[in-house]
Image (cartoon, coloured by chain):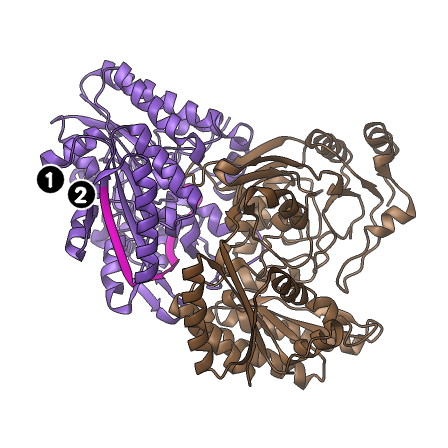
Chain colours: A purple, B brown
Amino acid sequence: MSLPEALVASLTALLGTRFSQTNADRDHHAQSESFHRAPPPDAVAWPKTTEEVSQIMAACSAAGVPVIAWGAGTSLEGHALAYSGGVTLDLTQMDKVVQIRPEDMQVTVQPGVTREALNTELRATGLFFPVDPGANASLGGMAATRASGTTAVRYGTMRDNVLALQVVLADGRIIRTGSRAVKSSAGYDLTALFLGSEGTLGIITELTLKLFGQPEEVASAVCAFVTLDDAVECVSATIQSGIPMARIEFVDAATACAFNQREGTTLPESPHLMIEFHGSPNGVREDAGRFGEIAAEFGAKDFDWATTAEDRARLWRMRHGAYHACLALRPGASGVVTDVCVPMSELPAAVHAAADDIAAEGLIGPIVGHVGDGNFHSLMLVDPGNPDEIAAAKRVAKKMAERALAVGGTITGEHGIGVGKRDLMAAQHGDAWAVMGAIKQALDPQNILNPGKMVPDRN
Amino acid sequence: MSLPEALVASLTALLGTRFSQTNADRDHHAQSESFHRAPPPDAVAWPKTTEEVSQIMAACSAAGVPVIAWGAGTSLEGHALAYSGGVTLDLTQMDKVVQIRPEDMQVTVQPGVTREALNTELRATGLFFPVDPGANASLGGMAATRASGTTAVRYGTMRDNVLALQVVLADGRIIRTGSRAVKSSAGYDLTALFLGSEGTLGIITELTLKLFGQPEEVASAVCAFVTLDDAVECVSATIQSGIPMARIEFVDAATACAFNQREGTTLPESPHLMIEFHGSPNGVREDAGRFGEIAAEFGAKDFDWATTAEDRARLWRMRHGAYHACLALRPGASGVVTDVCVPMSELPAAVHAAADDIAAEGLIGPIVGHVGDGNFHSLMLVDPGNPDEIAAAKRVAKKMAERALAVGGTITGEHGIGVGKRDLMAAQHGDAWAVMGAIKQALDPQNILNPGKMVPDRN
């Protein structure tokens, strides 16, 4: 489909060179971190202000043309791919930190600010924004997918850390949700509704976030376990003991091997936990000591405490590089990434079953996880030209999701639905999926916001 | 209006004596803790199961008759009053604790279970449910109003502590929202949407809640300040210092006086803070010591540490009795309760301005607050037969709400909208209020769920 001439004229008048129909710009927005691929959008727009987003939406609404929001392009389920064509709204130029309010421990940002850029800007204030999905994602994109990551066990997810939003609706109206108060009972929780809506209900153009004091003391470590079960059961026991961890990450033997190859480390090729404690010097010492006792019961060894800030940064850079380190285990491979999350008591069995399934299909599929939340991923390395391998990986992914649902968990802990998980929405939600469809219909009657995603097809 | 005969027949057949049209039963459900009054509903139904709720909703939907959910009747804004008649759905007989899962620190309950009943049931597990609005409210009602209370500063509100819901929709369909995983990115956050929807989108028939380990050590204290500003600024300073408090409550001089009259205490008649710390013995000692240093800077004195469990229970019983203790300051009076919540940095000025407004109108209006959240209440004691006093109190309430909005806060931190705050929804939400109306229209097209509340009137 090509765009109506009148729409092209009005968006060109509005945005000048920030509106493009060139193949290079379109193709750039047809790419994805994962194996999902789609045709490019018909055009790309780079707004700088909420008012421009509003005018773009009004124009596209009048023309009935799809609009797909684009953040940093780091999503893993093809969320921002333009399967129905239309205009991709690239928000990278809305990258201003609008206001820091240290006394309220809050910041207001535009959606294109990345989490790393925000934390650089905050450094002098003694505050930081803790949600950390690994990738240097945009905060708008993190909000739109209800992202979380390594620190959710302590600081929560985007659901817990967004106080207020400015949103442009399908017809161009601009609304504000939430407030700067830390709690409110004033009506439907529209903030929560837009968080995780993946661009299907509105375009987030401003976010007010909670900040936290940079911890007085930080202690990080990595330790090895003999078996996967030992490591995962150690996590369950630690959670139940109430020890406040800032991070507790599982990586399996294959991932440790990938780290060694890419980072030059000499980790034993066995399952590991990577942990971090935040607090006062006494508190951190006490917490680390108690964790050490529990870990010893599960046979932990090779404790390596990162004592300097540089060592800690290297430790978490390694963890955050797991995706690319694992991809390098098989040059040329694409990743099929899973993202289930289960109740803590179900975690050991779920990880074990996933590992067995991957082995039974003969796939390479390292497992890592934010196991303090019951959330884990396998990254199955498939030859993108081999349909049998892709099918095998998808079989494993489906089994993992079904097993998560059977024990009361979820098909996605933090990556979101995109195109990769939509087939599982009916199984996850039953009749509640139709309720999501009714809300979508109410807010976007023309179905122009990221169409073909999230909700059931309309009849 | 009277109910259609066919509806009466079908509900009688379904529920027997658990369906009533007697004046006594109807009148009981026309009462409210606050000054709001309404005509009674046409009938009252006491379902015991989700399936019965579903059948009631289907029958009322077919007849176009309103349905108003009723929990413990402790709401303060007339949420459950039947202004348009219809059937009040009294959920007190749905009072089963369905399943406790200690290993996941979760419990599933029916909506009529009260928070005190739940905590009694949990005592032997070492776990507790922390959200504590003071009143022994039902958990369904607390969810429907997104309640919080004294412990939100540490444990969060109902928004943070409800993992999953079972909900009966307007047409009788039964859905489940959320999951037992602690986080999920699987689609629109319907759990959050129903939390705080005050019975206007569906009837909550089951809730899965997060639980917490009973703290190893607890320390509570009350201390006096010379001025209101000193007390409130001490709270701001404490929050910014990052000291983890389990509770930090402000009561003003008038409330201290009410406690003395009702409880026989001998508190100085000046502003007070009531505080509590939860944690390990070392952690609590460290936190309490750091708080003591900050409080001393603001001139705190008369520190009274509650060292036994009995003393602590008495302290918080006293705080929770503030509403009735203050009402007793003026026998025969009704209370006009306010509930604003503002960013922490705005709290001292907001409390001060409210106190000035109350004094300027010549009203008695003690102020208490969950000041760790920036949330505070005045309880203005008015003669229910004196329209001038009621008008004066409402003027003060409106000013407080408008002032809260002007500084980025909210018209209600925890009580909800009901009938008392609906006039302020447009000011709070602007065009977002219409979005709430669109969602209501999508989920309840006949407008039978608690009609006349929450959303704009339909054209």
Label 1: few (<14), some (14–19) or many (≥20) C-alpha neighbours in 10 Å: few
> Residue beneath label 1, please?
A265
Total label count?
2
Please tell me whether residue B46 is drawn above or below residue B363 in the rendered image.
above
Please tell me whether residue B80 is drawn above or below residue B298 in the rendered image.
above
> Residue beneath label 2, please?
A318
Numbered disc in front, either 2 or 1: 1
Residue B315, percent from left and from top: 63, 66
- The answer to which of B116 and B394 lies nearer the viewer is B116
In the rendered structure, the answer to whether residue B67 lies left or right of residue A454 reads right
Label 2: few (<14), some (14–19) or many (≥20) C-alpha neighbours in 10 Å: some
**Residue at x-position 55% and y-position 85%:** B226
Chain for numbered disc 2:
A
Whether residue A20 can be seen here:
no
Whether residue A287 can be seen here:
yes
Residue A205 lies in the magenta-colored region? yes
**Residue at x-position 55% and y-position 74%:** B403
Mark 2 or mark 1: name the one nearer the start of the chain: 1
Residue A288, percent from left and from top: 31, 51
Circles 2, 1 touching at the beta carbon (< 8 Å): yes
> Could you tell me which secondary element the residue under label 2 belongs to?
helix
Using the rendered view, name the quadrant where residue A217 is placed: bottom left
Please tell me whether residue B300 is drawn above or below residue A233 in the rendered image.
below
Q: Do labels 2 and 1 share a chain?
A: yes
Range drawn in magenta: A196-222
Residue B142, percent from left and from top: 63, 50
> Could you tell me which secondary element the residue under label 1 belongs to?
loop
Circle 1: residue type:
Thr
Circle 2: residue type:
Met
